[in-house]
Amino acid sequence: MKKFILFQLVLLLSLRALADGTVSFETRQVPVNRGGEDGGTVTLRFYEDMPSVPYISVADFQQLMLPGTTITVSKTGEGEYLLEGPLAKATVNITSDQFSSDDYMNFTNLMGQVQEGMDNVGGASAPFLRYNHQELTPASATVSFDFSKYGIDLRGDDTAVYFPFATISDIFCDTDFHVASYNGEKVVVLTGDSNNNVAVLEPENAKRFLETENRNEDMAAFCYAELCFVIDHFYGMPGRSPLESGIQSEGLDKTLDTAENGPLIKQLIKSTNMSDYFIGMKSLQVLLADGGHTSLMVDLGIYMATQADGDNSAALEKWKETNEIIKDKYPSLYQPLMEQVEAIENNDEAYFEFARPTTSDEYYYKEGDTAYLMYNSFGDINEDAWKEYYEGGCEGETPAIDEGYLGDLSVVLDALKRANEDPEVKNFVVDLSTNTGGDFDVLMAMSVLMGGPNYYYSENIVTGQRQKIYYDVDCNFDGVFDENDKDVKYDLNIAVLISKISFSCANLLPSLMKDTGFPVIGERSGGGACAVQPFITPEGMQFQISSARARLTNDKWENIDTGIEPNYVVDVAEGYDAFYDVSAISDIINNHYNTDPTGILYVINRDNNHEYYDLFGRKLAGPPAKGIYIVDGKKVVK
C-alpha cells in the first residue's frame, strides 16, 4: 500500500450567498487522499440548510477524478445550464432538479485513467489486455435523472453548478472502481481496481464509524435519499430479489412500504442512531441478495477491510456479535438474516465436498491424456510483477507463480505450457468448480489464449443499450498488440468444468466458451450476471451492488444470472467424485472433439423404453454401471 501524507483540514470560513440570495454557505478547502497518495486539496461547499452534506462543483469534480480535464458550465436560462465535458454534454435545471444527457456514458467516462480513448466499459487495467471497441445497439440513448423525486437539491450560480458530493460521485461511478467520497475529514478518491476500498486507504477514519453512536439528522435523511436514487437507477436487476419489480415500477422507497419488514427497514436506515442504520442496511441486503455481488453490510465491510494481514475471522466474529443485537431489538429481522447466513455457510460446506485429486502444486493435475487446471479464483493479480515485467521491456520470462497470487494469469500460463509440452496430454480441463469469480482481465486473457472469443455480451440497463465489447490480448507477452499474438496456440482439447459454486467470472467464462463450441461439463453454474459497482455513502462507508451498467448475457442476449447449463451434465447425487473420474471426463472430451472415440457413449432410447445403445448403435443387454448417457437430449456422466 502506498503511503500518503496527512494534511490538516484547512477551513476557509467565508460565508457567502447564492446568486438568488436564498441560502448561505460555507466553503472548506479539504485535503485529498488520491489512491493512497497526496492529491492536494479540493473546495467543498456546506449550505446552511444542510450543514452536514458537502457539495462540489461539477468542474471541480471532473478535475478531481480525471486530472487535466474539466467540464465547462454555461448558464442558458433561469436555473438552466449546459455542461460540456471532454467527450459529451449534459443539461441541468436546478429549479426542477433535473439532469439529462444524450450521451450519458461518455459524459461520465473516467476510463481515460486506464487507456486513452477507452469507452466507458470495464477492464483493461492489466498490461496484457487492451480495450479495442464496442458495438452498441441502439447507437445512442438519452439518460435523465429527476432528483426532485428524492428531495435532492442541485444548486448553482452564474458560473457553476453544484451537486451533493455523493450524488455526482454516484453519477460518475463505474465498474472499474472510479469513485470518491468525503468522510468528514478528507476526500478519498479510488483510482481504479488496484485501490478499491476507502476503508483500506483510510482505516482509522473508517473504524470511527463503528464507534459513532449518532448521526446528524440532515445527513441521515440525505443518506436514505441517495440510497434510493442509487438502487432505483444502478441496481442491475439480475432476477433474484423479490423487490425488483417494485423498484422498477415505483422505486425503492414505495416498494419498502409493502415489502416484508420494509417499513421497519426504512425506519432503521433513516435513523440517526448509527447501530440502527447498520441493522437497516443489513436487512435491506437480505431483500436485495443476488448471490454475492450486492453487499450493503457497511459495518462488515469496515471490519473486514481494516483487519491486519487480511485475517477475516475476527471481523466475522465481531459481525456475528452485532447480529445478536438484532435478535434482541428487532426479532422479525433476525430470522431472514440468519437464513441468508445459513445459505452462505451451506455454500461454503458444498465447497469442501469436492474430493479433488492430490497434487503437489495445488493447481495442476495430470492423469493419462488429461490435465486439470484447478483454478479457484480469477484475480489476485500480482500487479507489481506484471508492471515490472512490462516496464522492463518484456524481457525474459513472464512473472513466475507466487503462492500469494494463485489467481494470477501466471498460474494459467504455467498449466497450459506444461500440458502443451507433455506428449501424453491431449485434453485440458479448466476446473472452475470451486471458483467464485474475480478479475475480468484474467478471464478475457484466458479466453483468448485458449482459442475462445475476445469479446463478451452485455446489457446496459441504465441506457437501454446492448453492448458487444472487444479486447486485444498480448498473447506472446512482448509488449505489442499485433498479428503475432494470433500465432500463440495450444494444441489441446480444452473443456470447462463447472458447479453450482461457479459464480461471476466463473459463470461468464463457461458462457463464452459454450457459445463458441467448447465443451462445458458438470452441473449448472451459480450465476452472477452483473458486474460489481462500488458506491460510497454520503458519510464515507463503502458498499457494492450488481451493476445496471453491465448485465452480462449469452450470444442470444439472454441474461445468464440463472447460470450456465453444461453441454455434459455430471450426476452429483452421490457427490462430486465424478468430476474427477478422469477416465470418464477424458471420454467426454475425446468424443466431443472426435479425436479418439474409444470411450463408450451409452444412449438411452428416446422412446423412453429404457433400452441402451453404445456409441456405434449396438443394443446393450441392460444399463451399464458406468458411462456417458443421453437423457432427454442431455449428456449425463455416471
Image (cartoon, rainbow, N blue to C red):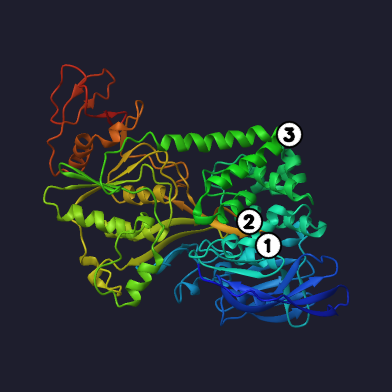
Q: In this view, which residue lies farthest toward the right?
A: 21
**Tag 2 residue:** 233
> Considering only vertical position in the picture, is 566 above or below 449?
above
Please name the residue shown 64% across and 40% down the image.
321
In the rendered image, residue 469, in percent from the top left (x then y), is placed at 41, 62
From what the image shows, is residue 445 above or below residue 282? Answer: below
Q: Position of residue 209 (x, y in %)?
A: 69, 56
Query: Looking at the image, which is closer to me, 556 or 370?
Result: 370
Q: Is residue 549 visible?
A: no
Front in this rendered view, residue 431 or 146: 431
- Mark 1 vs mark 2, CA separation in Å: 9 Å
> On the picture, is 38 further left or further right than 135?
right
- Residue 558: where, in percent of width, then height? 45, 47
Give the quadrant of residue 182.
bottom right
**Distance of label 3 from label 1 (alpha carbons):** 40 Å
Q: Secondary structure at mark 2?
A: helix
Which picture quadrant has residue 594?
A: top left
Q: Which residue corresponds to the image point at 58% horizontal and 73% vertical from the top-left?
A: 65
Q: Marks 1 and 2: CB-CB under 8 Å?
A: yes
**In-front residue for pair 491/404:** 404
What is the C-alpha distance between the residues marked 2 and 3?
A: 35 Å
Q: Which residue is pictured at 74% across the width and 83% down the height? A: 159
Which quadrant of the figure has residue 82?
Answer: bottom right
Amino acid type, residue under disc 1 in the picture: Phe
What element does badge 3 sit on? helix
Residue 145 is marked as: 1
Q: Earlier in the sequence, mark 2 or mark 3?
A: 2
User: In this figure, which residue is indicated by the disc labeled 3?
Assistant: 328
Give the class, few, some or many, for how many residues have Cα within 10 Å of label 3's Cα (few <14, many ≥20). Answer: few
